[in-house]
Image (cartoon, rainbow, N blue to C red):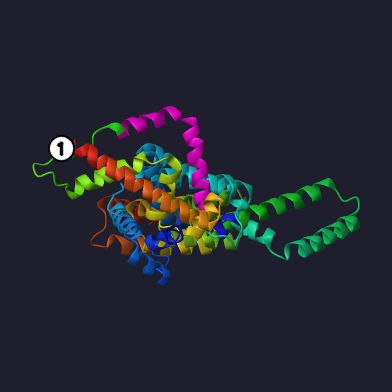
């Protein structure tokens, strides 16, 4: 082996990609120049590892997550996740084609149906679409998306049972206090629904945030739900209850009497 | 990355958490500027989002990311040439702990300073090659894909860069003794 051939292996030896071949070892054993070269490089290579490098500041992470949130907002404004995956699914084209055909046939049968009927049908479809979007966002990993989902649900005139159940679920289990508070606001107009009333009553015992507790008490008090008394009485008996929450609960109980 | 490309943008956070530190280190070693390096890391992830549709499923993400990183750094270098001359000025400063000791022995921290100066004296392409190979620990095949050249060319260039580094290191050691 010549010196030039031996040097072609040096990079592999340095990076540990390859141990010296038998030929290289034989050459190094008899060529002091190459041996000196390789030893010097190996030492330098090892020393390079001792050059420290600084860590980035926390600002970098903050900036990245702001960028990501912004990107998701822009992306989410186009289409929610559930729709995107639906659009990519193999079933999309045949089902959409069949749906278009059925709609076409139905419109053809209706013929010159009244414009009011078409408008109300269209409104119904838009409302249904909003509910799907709201449901999709409510299940999102990002708290800001879930908040948007709650807001979206309020844009539906009469949210269906699935949306209401999702809002109660967010109220009970969301890790983010802001999402839970937003869910309370969103549920306010549906307090006539027995399922929502029951969900709100049961939720009171699950909450550990005084802010959420106060908002729930307010909600039950405004709704004048007589069955809420038991939940409120249980709450007032809690030893570790925040004084402001206790006071609010006692006042709500007097109001419900 | 395939998930990010297909619209699951939250998955980008996983890639960020895995790669932002090595990327920052790569840029910091190249630019010697913390703020510029943080800007460049942000720029890389912005470009990943922007060009995510160009990512092909089979190709290694790290290679693709470093190609983007290189382009971002080249663009930044072109935009701010005056800043790069500042970096060169920085290199000419005496090392922080270069006062010769009585017995002329080089302490470990001095050695690191001298080695850093020697590395900074290398031409940009050789310095980048050593950063990719030694510090980022990329394989020769990955570097070849990033630099768009043959694997054997990378090996030869690594050897030459190390040889030059050895020469530069010897030079800064001699300057220290004067």
Q: Report x, y in % for residue A44.
A: 30, 53
**At 31% across and 35% down in the image, what residue appears?**
B91
Q: Which of A168 and A145 is in front in this view?
A: A145
Q: Quadrant of the N terminus of chain A?
A: bottom left
Residue, x 17% and y 47% (percent of image)? B106
Number of on-image labels: 1
* Span colored in magenta: B65-91
Assess disc 1: are there few (<14), some (14-19) or many (≥20) residues with their C-alpha within 10 Å of its C-alpha: few
Chain letter for mark 1: B
**Residue sticking out furthest to the top:** B82
Of residues B141 and B177, the one nearer the viewer is B177
Frontmost residue, B41 versus A52: A52
The residue where tag 1 is placed is B99
Most distant residue in the left direction: B102
Is residue B64 among the parts visible in the rendering? no
Q: Residue at x 51, y 59 (%)?
A: B141
Is residue B71 on the magenta stretch? yes
Residue A176: image location, x then y, percent: 41, 54
Q: In this view, does A27 lie to the left or right of A186?
A: left
Specify the quadrant that holds the C terminus of chain A.
Answer: bottom left
Q: Is residue A193 magenta?
A: no
Q: Can residue A129 be seen in this view?
A: yes
At which x and y percent is residue A55? 32, 48
Judge whether B120 appears above or below A108 on screen. above
As drawn, is A235 to the left or to the right of A23?
Answer: left
Instruction: Pick the residue in front: A202 or B98.
Output: B98
Residue A111 % position (x, y): 91, 53
Where residue A17 sits, quadrant-wise, is bottom left
Residue at the image position 39 percent from the left and 47 percent from the top: B24
**Label 1 element class:** loop
């Amino acid at each position: 082996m010549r010196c030039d051939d031996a040097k072609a292996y040096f990079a592999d030896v340095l990076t540990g990609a390859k141990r010296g071949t038998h030929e290289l070892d034989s050459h190094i054993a008899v060529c002091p120049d190459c041996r000196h070269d390789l030893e010097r490089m190996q030492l330098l290579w090892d020393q390079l590892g001792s050059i420290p490098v600084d860590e980035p500041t926390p600002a970098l992470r903050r900036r990245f997550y702001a960028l990501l949130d912004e990107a998701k907002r822009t992306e989410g404004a186009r289409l929610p996740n559930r729709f995107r995956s639906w659009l990519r699914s193999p079933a999309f084209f045949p089902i959409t084609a069949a749906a278009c055909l059925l709609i076409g046939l139905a419109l053809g049968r209706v013929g010159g149906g009244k414009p009011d009927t078409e408008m109300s049908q269209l409104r119904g479809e838009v409302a249904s679409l909003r509910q799907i979007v709201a449901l999709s966002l409510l299940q999102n990993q990002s708290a800001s998306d879930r908040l948007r989902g709650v807001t979206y649900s309020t844009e539906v005139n009469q949210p269906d049972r699935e949306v209401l159940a999702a809002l109660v679920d967010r109220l009970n289990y969301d890790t983010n206090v802001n999402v839970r508070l937003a869910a309370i606001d969103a549920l306010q107009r549906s307090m006539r629904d027995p399922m929502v009333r029951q969900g709100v009553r049961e939720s009171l015992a699950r909450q550990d945030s005084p802010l959420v507790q106060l908002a729930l008490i307010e909600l039950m008090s405004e709704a004048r739900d007589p069955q809420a008394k038991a939940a409120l009485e249980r709450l007032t008996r809690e030893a570790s209850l925040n004084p402001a929450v206790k006071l609010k609960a006692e006042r709500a109980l007097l109001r419900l009497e | 990355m395939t998930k990010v490309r297909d619209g699951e943008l939250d998955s980008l956070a996983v890639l960020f958490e895995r790669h932002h530190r090595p990327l920052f280190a790569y840029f910091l070693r190249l630019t010697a500027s913390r703020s510029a390096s943080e800007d460049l890391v942000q720029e890389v992830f912005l470009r990943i989002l922007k060009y995510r549709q160009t990512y092909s499923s089979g190709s290694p993400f790290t290679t693709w990311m470093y190609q983007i990183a290189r382009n971002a750094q080249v663009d930044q270098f072109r935009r701010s040439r005056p800043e790069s001359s500042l970096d060169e000025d920085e290199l000419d400063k005496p090392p922080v702990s270069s006062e010769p000791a009585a017995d002329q022995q080089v302490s470990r921290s001095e050695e690191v300073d001298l080695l850093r100066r020697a590395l900074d004296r290398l031409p940009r392409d050789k310095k980048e090659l050593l950063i990719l190979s030694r510090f980022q620990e990329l394989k020769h095949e990955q570097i070849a894909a990033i630099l768009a050249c043959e694997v054997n060319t990378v090996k030869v260039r690594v050897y030459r860069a190390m040889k030059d580094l050895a020469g530069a290191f010897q030079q800064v050691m001699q300057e220290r003794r004067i």
